[in-house]
Image (cartoon, rainbow, N blue to C red):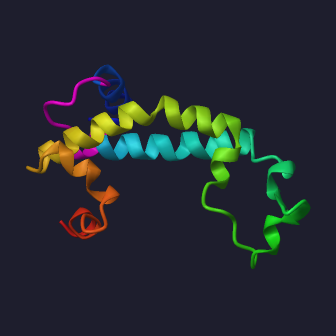
Amino acid sequence: MNFFEALKSVLKNVLQFKGRSSRSEYNYWMVFLFFIFLFAMEIDPPSPLSSTSFNNGDIENKESNNGEAPFLEPFESRLFSFVYFVFLLPTISVTVRRFHDTGKPGWFILLPFTIIGLVPYHYW
C-alpha cells in the first residue's frame, strides 16, 4: 500500500472500527498527521498574546518558567485546534483497527487514561 492509497483507505473507513489496518496504512497516516500538524503550526503559530497569563492581576510571561513551554501551547493556535479535531476520529479509527491487526482489542486505545495501563500500552 502506497502513501495515497493509505490516506484514501483511512478516510474511507472513518466510521469503521471493525476489521484490520495494515502497518503501512497506520504509519503513512501518522506521517501525514505529523506534516499536517507541522504545517498548521507554521501557518498559524500561537499568538504572542497567548504567551502571557494573568496571575493575581499581574501579567506574567510564561517564558519566565525556566524557558519551558506549557503543555497545551499548540492548542492556542486556532488552526492547529481545528485540524486536530477534524482528524481525531480517523486517527482513533485507524488506531483501533491497527490494534485489531496486532491481535489486541480496540479498547486498548483507552489504556493510557489509566495509570496502570501506561505500561502495557508502551511495552506490548
At 51% from the left and 33% from the top, the residue drawn is 85
Seen as rendered, the residue at the extreme bottom is 66
Q: Is residue 22 visible?
A: no
Q: In the rendered image, which quarter contains the C terminus?
A: bottom left
At 70% from the left and 42% from the top, the residue drawn is 77
Pinpoint residue 83: horizontal percent, then vertical percent: 56, 33
Which of the 4 quarters of the picture holds residue 20? top left
Which of the 4 quarters of the picture holds residue 95? top left
Tell me: 49 left or right of 40.
Answer: right
At 55% from the left and 44% from the top, the residue drawn is 35
Pinpoint residue 54: horizontal percent, then vertical percent: 84, 58
Q: In the rendered image, which quarter contains the N terminus?
A: top left
Asked whether 54 or 62 is in front, the reply is: 54
Asked whether 59 or 119 is in front, the reply is: 59
Which of the 4 quarters of the picture holds residue 41? top right
Find the magenta span and give its range: 14-25
Q: Is residue 15 magenta?
A: yes
Asked whether 42 or 115 is in front, the reply is: 115
**Relative height, residue 78 to residue 109 (above, below):** above
Q: Is residue 7 visible?
A: yes
**Relative height, residue 36 to residue 61 (above, below):** above
Q: How many marks?
A: 0
Pinpoint residue 74: horizontal percent, then vertical percent: 64, 50
**Relative height, residue 55 to residue 17 (above, below):** below
Asked whether 70 or 28 is in front, the reply is: 70
Q: Is residue 112 magenta?
A: no
At 23% from the left and 41% from the top, the residue drawn is 96
Prevailing secondary structure class for the magenta stretch in the rendered image: loop
